[in-house]
Amino acid sequence: MLKKLTMAGVFGFALMVLTSNVNAAFVTYTDRTTFEVAAGTVTTENFNEFTTPLSINPKDFGDFTTTNAGANVFVLQGGSHAASVDGTNFIQLRTLTFDKGFNVLFDEGVYAFGFDWRNTDTSGDHIEFGIGATSFDLGAPGSGFFGIVSTETIGKASPFFFSDTDGDGGELVFGAFDNFTYSHSAMSVPEPGIKLLFGISLLGLVGVRAACKIKKMKSC
């Protein structure tokens, strides 16, 4: 009996751990190509249709709406601003304190959201991105990409937010964001995960059958 319970416990624990990894709330990415492969069919807003500076408080971009949260936030023309991400139009964020920024709320929930960013601040302020109670520090001044892919829809009930990290240099000058990329398609469980789950299930069956066989032999 002890052997049977031990085997069942081992396989049950392994299955529980693997399942929790496959069904994680979301996965983060810092490479755009890898993110877009994981996200599936994507849509990108590059803000290039605007020919004059534009306040985003609020601004409906079709699938999502931006709102100012106490900061100076505008869509600006990239060619005239050194803070531009790639030389084209971008959203510029300037905060005076860490609890200011802007929000992005989708009309319908998305399974993936990513963006290119640049931080030109010279006082050590970092850009913070998040949703709900979860936030990410994008790191030291510089540039890059950040994205998340979720197993559930996000961005509708609770907005994505962009702000300044607490306790760094103070005023953020400047944060820049471009190429908001998102997907309304559900993320499927990766094939390797399915195969591993199937394999562990088979091992569990083998273990239980072996334990039953031992029990029958002892009862003879």
Image: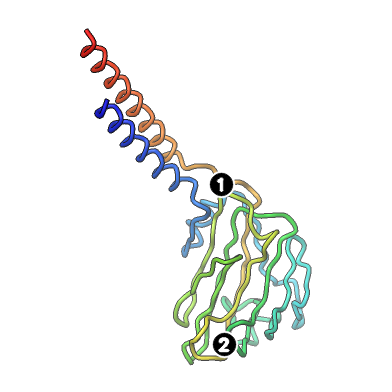
Splitting the image into 4 quarters, where does residue 202 fall? top left
State the residue position of label 2: 172
Which residue is drawn at the image coordinates 72% and 55% (left, top)? 108
- Please tell me whether residue 153 is drawn above or below residue 198 in the rendered image: below
Which quarter of the figure is the C terminus placed in?
Answer: top left
Which residue is drawn at the image coordinates 67% and 65% (left, top)? 159
Q: Residues within 10 Å of mark 1 (few under 14, many from 20)?
A: some
- Which x, y percent locates residue 141? 47, 83
Q: Relative to 22, is 88 on the left or the right?
A: right
Q: Amino acid at mark 1?
A: Met
- Which x, y percent locates residue 10? 31, 37
Which residue is drawn at the image coordinates 72% and 71% (left, top)? 66
- Please tell me whether residue 31 is drawn above or below residue 23 in the rendered image: below
Q: Relative to 1, is 155 on the left or the right?
A: right
Q: Amino acid at mark 2?
A: Leu
SS assignment at label 2: strand
Which residue is drawn at the image coordinates 59% and 56% (left, top)? 112
Q: Is residue 88 visible?
A: yes
- Please tell me whether residue 140 is drawn above or below residue 133 in the rendered image: below
* Of 62 and 195, the residue lying toward us: 195
Label ID, residue 187 = 1
Mark toward the start of the polypeptide (1 vs 2): 2
Q: Is residue 75 visible?
A: no
Splitting the image into 4 quarters, where does residue 216 fall? top left
- Please tell me whether residue 54 is drawn above or below residue 206 in the rendered image: below
**Cα–Cα gap, marks 1 and 2:** 35 Å
- Which x, y percent locates residue 205? 35, 24
Which quarter of the figure is the N terminus placed in?
Answer: top left
SS assignment at label 1: loop
